[in-house]
Amino acid sequence: MSLIVRRARIVSTTRVIEDAYIVVRDGVIVEVGREPYTGLSGAVVNAEGLIVMPGFIDTHTHGIHGLDFTVDREPSSVLQTAKHYVRYGVTGFLATTVTAQLEVLAEACRAVKEARDMWESAYGARILGVHLEGPYISSEVAGAHNRAYIRPPNVEEFKELLRACDNTLKQITLAPELPGASELIAYAKRLGVIVSAGHTQASYEEGLKSVELGVSKATHLFNAMTRFHHREPGIVLALLQSPNVYLEVIADFVHLHPAVVRMIVDYASPKRVILVTDSISATGMPDGVYELGGLKILVKHGVARLVDTGVLAGSTLTMDKAVRNVVRLGYSLRDVALMASHVPAKSLGLSGVGDINVGYHADLVMLDEALNVVRTIVGGEVVYES
């Protein structure tokens, strides 16, 4: 099957092409060029007046539209989320759990694995795998994680979770300063599982050591981490200064002040920054009371906080809004294509997604001049139209 996107303004990570076309065959981009298109006929999508970018990839999302990966542990629920994400321009995501009993996490992994086995483009966004956020985190900076289920890092337990995930586990967030964490980091790295430092009270020195062992990402940088101080900089500075570490940023301007977002991007460059949502089931839903990992969450004016402590509890951010926020800070759409698409894919070691190039999956988002999502294409199929 062929699809031709015509008369678009194409923004990839390396170039902007005005009045351009993209030819897709069997879900893969086979040609990118300037109009006029004179090749073989096929189904045409008119993108005149629209910006076409690589589809967004969210590597940290707990749920959306009333669904939660830790709670709704059924393949059908995971596939439903895939349909919801595409309305926000997301064409790939990591199903992210919160700290829970090991058997619950194993069930969540199995549900994602089965859903991924069933997935096809018509379902919506690609299910890229599982991101375990916890349970091996610091109870001192648990945030919205249930302290009752936080555990010390244990390689044998981790092996059980790996078996349940059956090659679906792509990333784990842990606190690298905990006893047993060094062994788990080294083991996960050997198996190709990405280790991200988060919910941690690690010192600057412990942060540098964790990077040497294999930590390659920072989970929502600054949030639920040792507070930066000029005499005790903590793990934040260690992660910022490590050139091979990717940095998650929740750009809702609630978790981070806009000036801090700008500081991170300017210091690390867009080639290391990953825009994430940390979205919860309340995303796309009205204000009210929700649950996350068994804890009550109050969402007011779109901001999610724990009912009993007022601590931030994930977000209701969507990737399209994160993109608009970062553009408002003065970054180019090419920078955004890096931070919202290419770098997230690269951080997971994925190839063939996250950019607009020949040989890549035809996972695209079409935006109007105000950067609202007009259409989302996954594997060469139009899966959402506004």
Image (cartoon, rainbow, N blue to C red):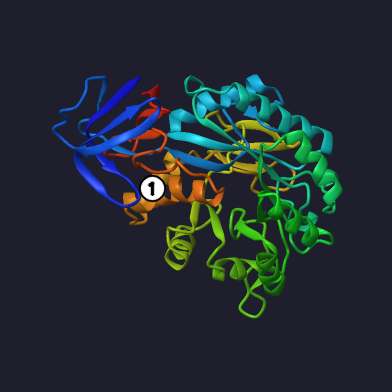
User: Which quarter of the image is occupied by the C terminus?
Assistant: top left
Q: Residue at x 59, y 23 (%)?
A: 79
43 versus 33 height, above or below:
above
Q: Position of residue 306 (x, y in %)?
A: 69, 43
Q: Is residue 252 visible?
A: no
Residue located farthest toward the bottom when viewing the structure as drawn: 231
User: Which quarter of the image is occupied by the N terminus?
Assistant: top left
Tell me the quarter of the picture where residue 78 sits.
top right
Q: Position of residue 10 (x, y in %)?
A: 27, 41
Q: Tell me: 38 left or right of 225.
A: left
Tell me the quarter of the picture where residue 247 sits.
bottom right
Q: Is residue 337 visible?
A: yes
Q: Residue at x 72, y 52 (%)?
A: 188
Query: Dot 1 corresponds to which residue?
Result: 337
Q: Tell me: 234 left or right of 244.
A: right
Q: Position of residue 278 (x, y in %)?
A: 58, 43
39 versus 305 height, above or below:
above
- Three-letter code, disc 1: Ala
SS under mark 1: helix
Q: Nearer the viewer, residue 292 or 24?
A: 24
33 versus 379 height, above or below:
below
Q: Residues within 10 Å of mark 1 (few under 14, many from 20)?
A: many
Q: Position of residue 105 (x, y in %)?
A: 77, 36
Q: Tell me: 76 left or right of 102.
A: left
Q: Residue at x 76, y 40 (%)?
A: 162
Q: Residue at x 44, y 48 (%)?
A: 342
